[in-house]
Amino acid sequence: MTTLQVGGHGDQVDPIAEAAARGATLAQFFLGDPQAWKGPEIRYAGGAAALKTAAEEAGITLYVHAPYVLNVATTNNRIRIPSRKFLQQYLDAAAEVGAAGVIVHGGHVLKNDDPAIGFDNWRKCIDGLDMRVRLLIENTAGGDNAMARRLERIARLWDAIGQAKGGDTVGFCLDTCHAHAGGEELVGLVDRVKAITGRIDLVHANDSRDAFDSGADRHANFGDGEVGTEALAEVVRTASVPVVVETPGGRKGQGADIAWLKENV
């Protein structure tokens, strides 16, 4: 048994209570509605400063997940431009609460677009960001036009980001459900990712409801999906970084999965 920094994704009203209820030392949460085109909201009583102080006193590491709607890769100006604006706002808000990082999905281009445009849009985005906390780009499960589904695309994305000012500080979040559903074998995946990015900063440890390469982003509790607990454990063990569990069942379901990781990694 090893010491593992692990937590779940919980309600944003009180991330400290959410972590405690899961027996966790880490809490991931949204700042507002993840499906809305709105700036961040701090719903913790007392605001950002109070949440930062409470987390420090409780020894809880905080991570903020950016809204799902953000897509800085797209050629659609009405999506890309506000995505950049809101991403900066979420980075600023995360800094105010003392978060360790902001996780954002890799995004996608339109059906007939050259993916190279999306990679360059990412470069432009990074060039224009003031990253007061670390930005973590997460691999995604589906879509042939995705920027971060398969390793070949992640390699091209990382090449583009590397050309941006501050690109060397951008981190990577590896989601096991997304990798499985996206068509990447979990065995040996940590080493294959690190050969491209040079780093993994956070693992989203989730089983997958659906089959390998299905493209379906549907999380399952450990042992209830198609990934297999040993493959999950190998990723967590090999990556040796903080872990967020985003499985169903809220405090009880995630708490059980967190307990399993503590006992088996």
Image (spheres, grey):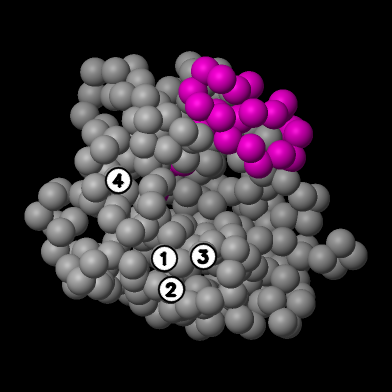
Q: Could you give the CA–CA distance between mark 3 and mark 2, rounded to whole angstroms?
A: 8 Å
Q: Specify whether residue 23 is in view.
A: yes
Q: Is residue 133 above or below residue 156?
A: below
- The amino acid sitting under disc 4 is Glu
- Is 217 displayed left or right of 109 in the figure? left
Crowd rating for badge 3 (residues with CA inside 10 Å; few <14, some 14–19, many 20+):
some
Give the image location of residue 14, x and y in percent. Answer: 28, 55
Q: Is residue 109 left or right of residue 256?
A: right
Q: Earlier in the sequence, mark 2 or mark 1?
A: 1
Q: Which residue is mark 4?
A: 18
C-beta proximity under 8 Å, tags 2 and 1: yes
Amino acid residing under circle 3: Asp
Reading the image, the residue beneath label 1 is: 31
CB atoms at circles 4 and 1 under 8 Å apart? no
Please provide percent x and percent y for residue 93: 35, 74
Q: Residue at x 24, y 34 (%)?
A: 23
Spot occupied by residue 224 in the image (x, y as percentages of width and height): 56, 20
Q: Which residue is mark 3?
A: 33
Name the residue type under label 2.
Pro
Mark 4 and 2 residues: CB-CB less than 8 Å, in contact? no
The residue beneath circle 2 is 40
